[in-house]
Image (tube, grey):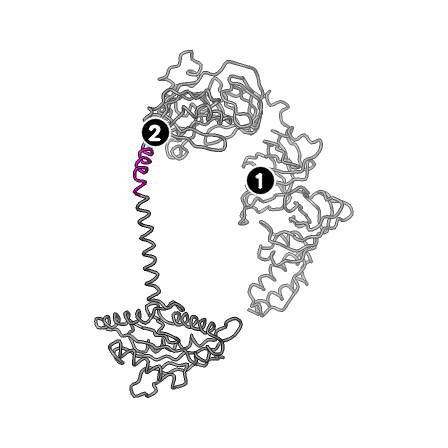
């Protein structure tokens, strides 16, 4: 690893002698980081990081490099400063190498502005998307500089993120101007899509006059990111009207533009398509102020999304100026402005069959809507051509979806499901129809038809739009007419009657339940008492271990089991060393705690299938069954002696304990209960005779075995 560091340092030294300081500040940090990443930490002597003196040197770091906190000292020009920004107050600095974002730690008393000459001192930070200068101190220098010459850019280039934080110029048409506190957000449309441009609000500036103007905006390309530091979009931040140039002003009055028929929107024309506003005219079929306005002319209908809150009535003739686009594969007008042109007669709805709305047809919608006599057969031949028109349809109510703005209704007709959407006053409809409008009712609704195109089928087939689903937008509560209601014996009432019957049956059988509860309660008390007595009879009251009788029963069963399987068992007799002396020295209360602790250690030292029992006093017995070899018993006995001999701390006093263990195996040392007990007890006395704190395998001739192990009571 060390040679790589030597090469990196040599290369940096050569650059110092050949390159200008600005280039050195750009190249040295990545090389140094490369050398550090290829070296052992122990190979690196402590070194100070070089000072970065250009914006490109900071912005050219990787996030990992920026996290090292390189010291930064840059002199440059402020290209954008927003004191109202939530979070970090947006500040961008440009020098001759590029731009970089600065998170000011403390702002000087005189306010900053675009063009201010400043000196920034801070450290590098990974930032939310690209490296920034953080914890910075800013000093305003005398005088000011002109803003740098911007680089012409496009929306597609900005969305790659390659021009992040750089000073750019973008050309487009202003679609809308919205105010957000102290900020103004312009929506700029270009041939490659739309982007927003944000600036601080200026007194006296007429931002509405910019709508539909072709402009060039010079500003900083700022990223939009998510919590994973991923780029989700871009926006422009520009320092005010001084960096916005109007190339072609908007028409003084958009309503003086030629009126377009609704059916001509998005139709083929040999002339270049205009990206400016269009002017349409029609009669109002639906008005949800501040949300949606639907109109029809002599060709078709159209629903327009607008924030205009002008109060309109059905049949009013209005002019609409807005920008043409597509929404769900259908024509749409956005950022619309409305103007009332006169009152007119209400539009007559077209009666349609929801099933026939999906069928192909060629009849012109205006022929039906303007005819004095509605030809139902002709009307039923329409498909998506009904979009935006006032229609009347019949269906059966099959459900509702409850939301914050009221309920939407789900209707069914001839196997076709469609949604009916009430206006903002949906709660009024709920109140008027709650008692009578029930599932299964047949109702007639009048409203505006809004279709959704099946884009997948359109693409796969001949390219003609096919209707996938539709909904009907209601104008008022009077648009819902109940034609019939289901009989009283509905599914809901059937459930209610069934509930009453169930309640009656429950009442009849209540006394049986009460009696059974009393019987169960008494039986439970008796069973609990029996279980308690049985537990007291089978378990030691102090340690909770099984008593001698339980051990004898399990030993008998184990002896019968080994006669059928080629396994063996062992019986361990465990006795606490010098327990009487411990009792006399510390008292019986401490002695009881010692016995409980030893009992727990015994249980933890053996297997789950083994039995640990208290025979009485300070004597315990362990039954090891299912052994395959005799040395398994020796291993467990050794583990018992080792685990138990650890000192016990009781009330701040340390108590030294140890045990002696005698082991007898079956069938080597006996094949019945009496013999195993006698021989394991004899082995126990052999262990005590050898000095205690050890285990002893039974030996008839009392000869010490090789498997005797001894442990110190004070291990080091």
From where the camera sits, is residue 569 visible?
Answer: yes
Q: Residues within 10 Å of mark 2 (few under 14, many from 20)?
A: few
Residue closest to the far right: 142
> Is residue 325 placed above or below 108 in the rendered structure?
above
Q: Please tell me in which quadrant of the rendered image residue 215 appears.
A: top right
Q: Position of residue 570 (x, y in %)?
A: 30, 76
> Is residue 242 placed above or below 276 in the rendered structure?
below
Q: Position of residue 523 (x, y in %)?
A: 31, 53
> Is residue 57 placed above or below 220 in the rendered structure?
below
Viewer-proximal residue, 106 or 270?
106
Secondary structure, mark 1, is: loop
Q: Position of residue 599 (x, y in %)?
A: 40, 71
Dominant SS of magenta comes to helix
Q: Position of residue 308 (x, y in %)?
A: 58, 26
Which segment did they paint magenta? 498-512
Viewer-proximal residue, 445 or 30?
445
Horizontal relation, residue 219 to residue 547: left or right: right
- Magenta stretch encompasses residue 502: yes
Residue closest to the far left: 564
User: Mark 2 sits on what residue?
Assistant: 493
The CA distance from mark 2 to mark 1 is: 65 Å
- Magenta stretch encompasses residue 388: no
Q: Please tell me in which quadrant of the rendered image residue 399 appears.
A: top left
User: Mark 1 sits on what residue?
Assistant: 154
Name the residue located 33 percent from the left edge and 66 percent from the top edge: 537
């Amino acid at each position: 690893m060390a040679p790589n560091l030597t090469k990196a340092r040599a290369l940096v030294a050569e650059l110092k002698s050949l390159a200008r300081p600005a280039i050195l500040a750009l190249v040295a940090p990545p090389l140094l980081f490369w050398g550090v990443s290829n070296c052992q930490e122990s190979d690196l002597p402590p070194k100070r990081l070089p000072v970065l003196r250009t914006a490109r040197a900071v912005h050219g770091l990787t996030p990992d490099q920026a996290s090292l906190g390189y010291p930064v000292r840059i002199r440059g020009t402020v290209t954008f400063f927003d004191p109202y920004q939530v979070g970090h107050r947006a500040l961008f600095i440009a020098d001759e190498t590029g731009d970089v974002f600065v998170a000011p730690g403390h702002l000087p008393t005189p306010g900053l502005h675009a063009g201010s000459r400043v000196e920034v001192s801070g450290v590098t930070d990974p930032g939310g998307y690209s490296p920034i200068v953080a914890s910075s101190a800013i000093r305003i220098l005398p005088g000011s500089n002109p803003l740098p010459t911007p680089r012409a850019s496009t929306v597609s280039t900005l969305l790659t993120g390659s021009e992040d934080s750089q000073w750019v110029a973008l050309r487009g048409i202003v679609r809308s101007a919205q105010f957000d506190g102290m900020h103004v957000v312009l929506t700029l449309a270009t041939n490659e899509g739309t982007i927003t441009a944000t600036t601080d609000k200026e007194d006296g500036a007429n931002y509405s006059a910019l709508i539909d103007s072709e402009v060039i905006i010079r500003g900083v390309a700022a990223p939009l990111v998510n919590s994973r530091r991923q780029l989700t979009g871009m926006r422009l931040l520009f320092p005010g009207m001084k960096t916005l140039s109007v190339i072609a002003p908007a028409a003084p009055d958009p309503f003086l533009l030629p009126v377009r028929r609704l059916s001509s929107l998005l139709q083929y024309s040999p002339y270049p398509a205009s990206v400016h506003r269009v002017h349409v005219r029609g009669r109002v079929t639906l008005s949800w102020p501040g949300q949606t306005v639907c109109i029809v002319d002599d060709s078709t209908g159209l629903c327009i999304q607008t924030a205009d809150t002008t109060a309109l009535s059905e049949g009013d003739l209005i002019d609409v100026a807005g920008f043409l686009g597509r929404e769900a594969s259908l024509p749409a007008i956005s950022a619309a402005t409305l103007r009332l042109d006169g009152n007119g007669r209400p539009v007559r709805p077209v009666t349609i069959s929801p099933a026939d709305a999906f069928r192909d047809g060629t009849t012109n919608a205006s022929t039906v809507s303007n005819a004095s006599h509605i030809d139902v057969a002709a009307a039923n031949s329409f498909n998506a051509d009904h979009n935006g028109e006032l229609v009347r349809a019949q269906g059966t109510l099959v459900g509702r979806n409850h939301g914050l703005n009221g309920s939407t209704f789900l209707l069914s007709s001839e196997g076709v499901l469609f949604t009916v959407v009430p206006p903002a006053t949906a709660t009024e409809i709920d109140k008027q129809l709650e008692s009578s409008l029930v599932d299964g009712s047949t109702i007639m609704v009048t409203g505006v038809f809004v279709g959704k195109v099946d884009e997948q089928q359109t693409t796969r087939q001949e390219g003609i739009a096919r209707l996938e689903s539709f909904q009907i937008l209601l104008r008022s509560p009077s648009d819902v007419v109940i034609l019939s209601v289901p009989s009283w014996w509905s599914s809901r009432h059937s459930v209610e009657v069934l509930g009453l019957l169930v309640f009656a049956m429950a009442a009849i059988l209540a006394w049986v339940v009460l009696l059974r509860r009393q019987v169960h309660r008494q039986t439970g008390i008796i069973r609990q008492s029996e279980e308690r007595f049985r537990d007291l009879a089978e378990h030691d009251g102090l340690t909770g271990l099984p008593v001698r009788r339980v051990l004898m029963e399990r030993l008998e069963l184990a002896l019968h089991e080994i006669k059928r399987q080629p396994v063996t068992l062992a019986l361990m007799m465990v006795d606490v060393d010098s327990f009487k002396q411990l009792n006399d020295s510390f008292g019986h209360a401490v002695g009881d705690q010692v016995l409980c602790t030893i009992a727990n250690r015994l249980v933890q030292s053996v297997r789950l299938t083994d039995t640990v029992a208290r025979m009485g006093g300070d004597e315990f017995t362990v039954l090891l069954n299912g052994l395959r070899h005799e040395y398994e018993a020796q291993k467990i006995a050794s583990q018992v002696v080792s685990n138990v001999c650890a000192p016990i701390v009781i009330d701040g006093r340390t108590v030294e304990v140890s045990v002696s263990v005698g082991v007898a195996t079956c069938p080597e040392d006996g094949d019945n209960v009496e013999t195993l007990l006698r021989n394991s007890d004899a082995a126990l006395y052999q262990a005590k005779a050898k000095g205690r704190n050890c285990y002893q395998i039974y030996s008839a001739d009392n000869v010490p075995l090789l498997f005797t192990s001894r442990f110190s009571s004070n291990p080091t």
